[in-house]
Amino acid sequence: MQDIHRFEATSVSCFSENGVDIIGLSDDDQEPEHFVVLMQMREEGIPGEQSIEMQTEATGRPVTGSFMAVRLAGHHMQVALTEEWQELLGYGTIEVILPERHEHQLLAQYLHLCLDDTAIELTIDN
C-alpha cells in the first residue's frame, strides 16, 4: 500500500516521564486535528517491540505492533505502518513535515532511545 497520510507539525515534543520515553508531533498544541505519538515503556521483561506504542488521531488509543520503520530526514519524519495497520487505516505511511525550527538532534536522540533495542528499522539522515 503506497498511500501516505501527511500533515505539517507545529509542535514537536520529546521527553521522559515516569519511565516512559515520549515523542509527540502534532499540528496544534491545544486541539490537534492530526498527531502521532511514539512511546516506549521501560519495564524489565518486556521485549523491545512490545514496549513501543504509537497513537494517532486514527488509532484513538496507543497500540503496539503498528509500525515497522521510522525515517528522519531533514524536515520530514516518516513512519511506515505494518500490513495489519495499513489495512485498518487505509494508508501505508505517516509523513510529518517538521517545523523549520525543530530540534533535529533531540528528536534523533529520542528516536534512538526508543527504537535502538527493537527490530523497528530506524534511518536518520541529516
Image (tube, grey):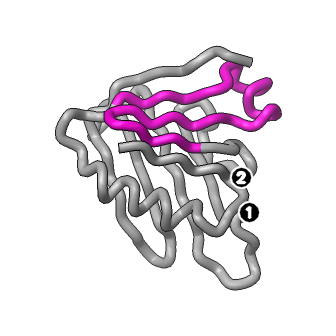
Taking 24 as reference, is 27 above or below it?
A: above
Q: Which residues are magenta?
A: 70-97
Q: Name the residue rendered at 29%, 49% in the picture.
A: 104
Residue 96 among those drawn in magenta = yes
Image coordinates of residue 107 in percent, x first then y, are 36, 53
Q: Amino acid at mark 1?
A: Gln
Image coordinates of residue 113 in percent, x first then y, are 49, 67
Residues packed near mark 2 inside 10 Å, few (<14), some (14 to 19) or many (20 plus) = some
Q: Toward which corner of the image does residue 91 lie, by quadrant?
A: top right
119 relative position to 9: left or right? right
Q: Amino acid at mark 2?
A: Thr
Q: Are marks 2 and 1 in contact (CB under 8 Å)?
A: yes
Q: Considering the image in quadrants, where does the C terminus appear?
A: top left
Q: Name the residue rendered at 74%, 18% in the picture.
A: 1
Q: Name the residue rendered at 79%, 24% in the picture.
A: 87
125 relative position to 39: left or right? left
Image coordinates of residue 93 in percent, x first then y, are 61, 27
Residue most toward the left? 101
Q: Toward which corner of the image does residue 101 lie, by quadrant?
A: top left
User: Secondary structure under badge 2?
Assistant: loop
Q: Which residue is mark 1?
A: 50
What number of labels is visible? 2
Q: Which residue is mark 2?
A: 64
Q: Give the number of the disc on residue 81.
A: none
Task: Pick whichever, 63 or 70, lies toward us.
Answer: 70
Residue most toward the bottom? 44
Residue most toward the front? 126
Residue 93 among those drawn in magenta = yes
Image coordinates of residue 50 in percent, x first then y, are 74, 63
Mark closer to the chain start, 2 or 1: 1
Q: Name the residue rendered at 41%, 23% in the picture.
A: 7
